[in-house]
Amino acid sequence: MSWEAVIGIETHVELSTRSKMFCGCAVDFGAEPNTNICPVCLGLPGALPVPNRKAIEGIVAIGLALNCEITERSVFHRKNYFYADLPKNYQVSQFDVPVCRDGYLEIELDGETRRIGIERAHMEEDTGKSTHVGDGGRIHSASETLLDFNRSGVPLVEIVSRPDIRSAAEARAYAQELRAIVAELGVSDARLEEGSIRFDANISIRPAGSDTLGTKVEIKNMNSFRSLERAVDYEIRRQIAAVEAGQQIVQETRHWNEEAGETQSMRTKEGSSDYRYFADPDLVPLVVPPSWVEEIRASLPELPEARRKRYATLGLHPKAAAMLSSSARTIRHLFDETVAAGAPALAAFNWLTGEVTAWMRRTDTEPAELTGERLAALIALVDEGVVSATAAKEVLEGVLAGEGEPRQVAEARDLVQVSDRGALEGAVRRVLDADPDAVERLRSGEEKVIGFLVGQVMRETGGKADPRLVNELIREAVGSDG
Amino acid sequence: MPVDIDIAHVARLARLELTPEEMETYRSQLGVILEHAARVQALEGEPEVGSVHGLGIEGVFRDDEVAASLDRDEVLAAAPESRDGFFVVPPALEQ
Ligand SMILES: [Zn+2]
């Protein structure tokens, strides 16, 4: 039988506000433990939470970017459970009326676009951080737990996809696209390694083409896109093997173990009713009027999907458009400037993702001396045959090093090609006279000889001749029209 | 209308250890409260978002400004155990 995977992804995004979700404690991850804590985020009796306006702007921006409906009146609920890093014994979250509902995200995979539904995105708060000490930090053999509440109460947005994802590669593409959007919005640092964006996957399998849903398993602890893809792939194969061997899939949470390359059982998942959600009596309804939504919509930057489409209309191949879209902001900005200055999009793309990006990596500096106008001028110099493609790279180095405009650099570094017929005819004549045998072979149709002769002329002129013109002059002199 | 309560389950979720007598006491007390709630619910149907609190206040926010936090030493002094700026608690084990 052939099987189909059904995957949904839950994403937690920490918003990079200055202060926490419900109190004025600073959000600062490098801080000494327990230095940003107060009665609200420590859950002391009688403390009253007040929502951070900036965090609400953040979740609305995310919702709009994910094509969600924004709920005008939503409700904060308490999600009750006991864990040492949760000082109130409940997490403020949202339940049946979240801020964002019914959106979608488009991903591109192997040249195809797929739409992944977004069920909801809701506002909540992060927990504190626990460190288990003793016996190598392993939770099962820890002798004690250390708690730092600096992270307790940091604004957190949970984004829940619909189970529309069908493969590990799609899961990765979804996570990458979502991260790119959140980063572009500037509402979060969105760094996987630091946990400011975290992905969990719900996975089940069913006979291909079937409409039923199998028992789902939740996978946690994937802190890179690669481990997300590996974990999902492993889990799909594990479930298929289990079902084909006649076993039942148990609804549970499993941990991805990167070293072992497998998912491992943690505990049976508590049903959602066990969290005893109820409306938080300390928090009044959250109101986001349409005027506020429109204000936030107007402030949204160009998002990756729109950007890719715009690049494609400029004539870039979809793969190139995707590559440019995920390039550094400086590169994208220079691309727009260069095209605006009249350069062809493809040439601008090649220079920026090639030489300029390589230079940035090599020197670990921003190309402060490069402007769109200068790059467009350099592209024009190559186009007009003033400098050769090889010499142009050297001109770029000069421009990046602060030596001035491309033409100035080309002249100062003596890289301007000789494109004057009169100046080149002498060199061509000398080369042809010195090798009558080659001339004879070219005349008799031996085409590869032309390359050799052009090379000789280039050597004669110290590499400064325009090879196209040299080619033309040789053919004229020999009387072969190629 | 009597409400059926799994009092042992509720106690387990709240991490309460109850004697059989206590279970009976709480079952009947909680029962009264839940019956009342059920009656109110039957009257009103599904509550509107705005009526969850009945305060008539909504859309309250604060600006994203940092305010002073508590003094760490003072806070940790109230904890049963602390070390190097951390609260120390018994090992958190998976259940
Ligand atoms: Zn606080």
Image: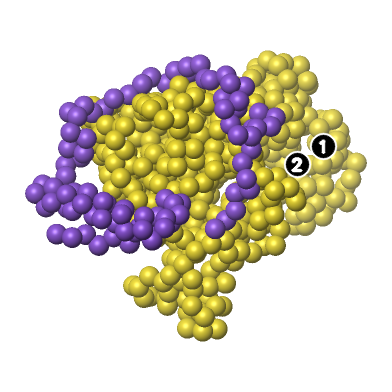
Chain colours: A yellow, B purple
Classify residue A92 by image quadrant: top left
Q: Amino acid at mark 1?
A: Val
Name the secondary structure under disc 2. helix
Is A413 above or below relative to B91? above
Is A443 above or below relative to A42? below
The image's mark for residue A457 is 1
Which residue is nearer to you in this view: A269 or A207? A269
The image's mark for residue A474 is 2
The x and y percentages for residue A431 are 86, 39
Drawn side of residue A478 relative to residue A210, left or right: right
Is A90 above or below relative to A42? below
Q: Residue at x 38, y 75 (%)?
A: A209
Which residue is nearer to you in this view: A188 or A428? A188
Drawn side of residue A432 relative to residue A170, left or right: right
Drawn side of residue A75 relative to residue A143, left or right: left
Label 1 residue near ligand 1, CB within 8 Å: no
Name the secondary structure under disc 1. helix
Farthest left residue in view:
B43
Which residue is nearer to you in this view: B34 or A404? B34
Q: Mark 1 belongs to which subunit?
A: A
Contact flag, marks 1 and 2 (Cβ < 8 Å): yes
Which residue is nearer to you in this view: B93 or A437? B93
The x and y percentages for residue A434 are 90, 41
**Mark with earlier residue (1, 2):** 1
The x and y percentages for residue A211 are 34, 72
Q: Residue at x 51, y 16 (%)?
A: B68
The x and y percentages for residue A188 are 50, 33
Q: Amino acid at mark 2?
A: Ile
Question: Is residue A61 visible in the rendered structure shown here?
Answer: no
What's the distance in space between the residues labelled 1 and 2, CA to CA? 9 Å
